[in-house]
Amino acid sequence: MSINNVYQPTAENLARAAEAIKSGKLVSFPTDTVYGLGANVYNAQAVANIFKAKERPLFDPLISHIAEIDFLPEYVETDSRVMDLARHFWPGPLTFVLKRKDNNPSIDLACAGLGSLAVRMPNHPVALALIKQSGVPIVAPSANKFKTVSPTTAQHVQDSLGDKVDMILEGGACKIGVETTIIDLTGKQVTILRAGGLAREDLEDFLGEKVLINDTSSSRPTAPGQLLKHYAPKLPLRINVEEKDVKEDEFFIAFGTTKRQANINLSKKGDLCEAAANLFAAFVRSRSQFVCCFKRG
Ligand code: TXA
Ligand code: MG
């Protein structure tokens, strides 16, 4: 039996959701990128329940969500480069991987036993209010089953994990619609571990230096989002297909202007940000045997 546990983010419901987080329950909340499945980082049982709900392997660490930049040095090792990046890009679609500050065993599970910790500040009023009222960092992966596409609406969360979540806070469609860019700040050179909502060029402009990209894929990643299978739609997907090569029985996801009738157009005006925001939702809507993307330009 399916239950509807989507709540409007009223003051009363936010207080209730914060209590739920504090007491070790799971709350799904909207962010600027995608919906997260949140738990109190200091409650190991709650963190374990995230892995269980998502059917996610325990070696895949989680991102901590915080609501104040000043809290960062209390939580992880920082330096002036880290703080400058935080002041410039937070709140926003950028996650830092930093050295862990202490060996607090209660965050071991969230870190998957690594010596580093991923942390971000989301740019969404509902997320920020929930974190502040909970009074703890909230660990949250995207609120979808492991390896499937990430949810960009409360309804997606309800459809995918509805019965495994105590509350889902409604926050409308996510503006960015793809996950955060994750950068490794544990070494001298800044390295992108996962491409996402913030462009490499924006980082390079700010830092005044080249940013590396870690593009190794493996079945047991030290870097995020890099399992050989990740963000997979349920059906086979062909990308960068010419319009003329789209087959009759294919679900045609277009980009920009097309002559052929598309099932969905990610952005008629060819805007990459708008397309990113619509991408996962388009995957969810496609029902025919193949999904197909139209080549840009
Ligand atoms: O936009 C986002 O980042 C969303 C929203 C909810 O914040 N979250 C998200 O979380 O995408 P998740 O769990 O689906 O992806 C986080 C990625 C994982 O692939 C994990 O491997 C990586 O971050 N990660 C977490 N901690 C790490 C660490 N210490 N070192 C390297 N990678 C890490
Ligand atoms: Mg994810």
Image (cartoon, rainbow, N blue to C red):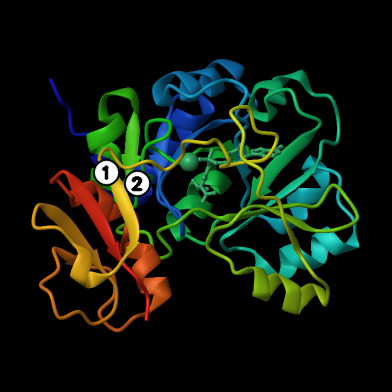
Q: Would residue 6 be visible to someone looking at this image?
A: yes
Q: Are marks 1 and 2 in contact (CB under 8 Å)?
A: yes
Label located before the other in sequence (1 or 2): 2
Q: Examine the rendered structure and indicate whether residue 155 appears above or below residue 115.
A: below
Q: Examine the rendered structure and indicate whether residue 44 appears above or below residue 264.
A: above
Tell whether 108 sits left or right of 247: right
User: Crowding at label 1, few (<14), some or many (≥20) Cα neighbours within 10 Å?
Assistant: some
Assess mark 2: CB under 8 A from ligand 1? no
Q: Which residue is mark 2?
A: 151
Q: Residue at x 45, y 54 (%)?
A: 31
User: Crowding at label 2, few (<14), some or many (≥20) Cα neighbours within 10 Å?
Assistant: many
Residue type at numbered disc 2: Pro
Viewer-proximal residue, 228 or 182?
228
Assess mark 1: CB under 8 A from ligand 1? no
Q: Would residue 170 be visible to someone looking at this image?
A: no
Occupied quadrant, residue 65 = top right
Q: Residue at x 33, y 23 (%)?
A: 164
Residue furthest to the top in view is: 45
Element at label 1:
helix
- Image coordinates for residue 40, horizontal then vertical, percent: 57, 30
Q: Examine the rendered structure and indicate whether residue 109 appears above or below residue 218.
A: above
Residue type at numbered disc 1: His
Residue furthest to the front in view is: 245
Element at label 2:
loop
Q: Examine the rendered structure and indicate whether residue 257 appears above or below residue 4.
A: below
Q: Residue at x 31, y 63 (%)?
A: 278
- Image coordinates for residue 263, horizontal then vertical, percent: 13, 63
Q: Which residue is mark 1?
A: 156
- Cα–Cα span, label 1 and label 2: 5 Å
Report the number of numbered marks. Answer: 2
Occupied quadrant, residue 155 = top left
- Image coordinates for residue 201, horizontal then vertical, percent: 66, 75
